Amino acid sequence: MIELQHVTKIYPGGSSGFKALDSIQLELPPGEFVAIVGKSGSGKSTLINLIAGLDRPTSGNIWVGGKPIHAMDETALATWRGLNVGVVFQFFQLLPTLTIAENVILPMDFCQDFSKRQARERALALLDQVGIADQADKLPTSLSGGQQQRAAIARALANDPPFIVADEPTGNLDSHTAEAVITQLAGLAEAGKTVLMVTHERDWAEFAHRVVTMADGRVVGRKLRVDRVNNLLLEADHV
């Protein structure tokens, strides 16, 4: 469960600062694919940055998986984030001097839960899962945008986090490649992970179980895709 209680975020600037989020109240259940939609400047990215522990609220409480991340110090927050959150950025953020496999291994090195051999084996398995194992020993610049985003998804899964955050993951991709990436993210939710995606593309939001609409730093709409939920129930009946 993700729960935000009266969360406000004010950035410095001007006489009173810029209020990016205004007393947000929000609850999201685990194991869903959630799309956060809204116009530029509506607060979408700020919202998921706070939930992922990449930024801190000015006021209010944020609970993720029963943990009060608003109350953690920087060391505890970094450790929690490394073990629990995988982040997929719009611009991939792959380190250009490392191979694709080395980029995927990097989060495992941070958490120190794998030997070098285990980390390499896991990286190759994750790259195979996203369909680019044959690109493992290449540098990011030799891959297409779609392949780099798949590598970023593999990296986000490195420590098997329960929570995946994707900020405009299709913003730099053509429509065919974008659909493949969205399908991969939806598959992660089907496998039991909580996936939170920011997008301004309403078509991609239709892949989600739940759509949260934002405007001017507030949540102005919540929509549960009943058809998606019914499909999940039907699939569960056949397991």
Image: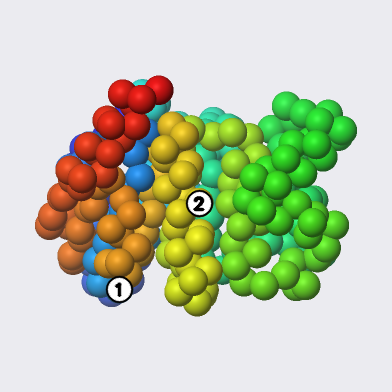
Q: Name the disc covering residue 141, or none.
A: none
Q: Earlier in the sequence, mark 1 or mark 2?
A: 1
CA–CA distance in space, label 1 to label 2: 25 Å
Q: 88 and 239: which one is in front? A: 239
Secondary structure of the residue carrying numbered label 2: helix
So how many labels did they put on this image?
2
Q: Are marks 1 and 2 in contact (CB under 8 Å)?
A: no
Q: Position of residue 209 (x, y in %)?
A: 28, 45
Q: 126 and 239: which one is in front? A: 239
Instruction: Name the amino acid, label 2.
Output: Gln
Secondary structure of the residue carrying numbered label 1: loop
Would you identify the image quadrant in which residue 124 lies? Answer: top right
| Above/below status of 212 relative to 229 | below
| Residue found at x 18% / y 66% | 216
**Residue 29 visible within the image:** yes
* Left or right side of 149 for 226: left
| Residue found at x 62% / y 71% | 145
Task: Mark 1: give few (<14), some (14-19) or many (20+) Cα within 10 Å.
Answer: few
Q: 59 and 96: which one is in front? A: 96
Q: Name the disc covering residue 184, or none.
A: 2
* Left or right side of 86 for 158: right
Would you identify the image quadrant in which residue 157 lies? Answer: top right
| Residue found at x 59% / y 33% | 160
Q: Position of residue 68 (x, y in %)?
A: 37, 29
Q: In which quadrant of the rendered image does the C terminus lie?
A: top left
Instruction: Name the amino acid, label 1.
Output: Ser
* Left or right side of 90 for 211: left
| Above/below status of 163 relative to 174 | above
Q: Residue furthest left?
A: 220
**Which residue is under mark 1?**
40
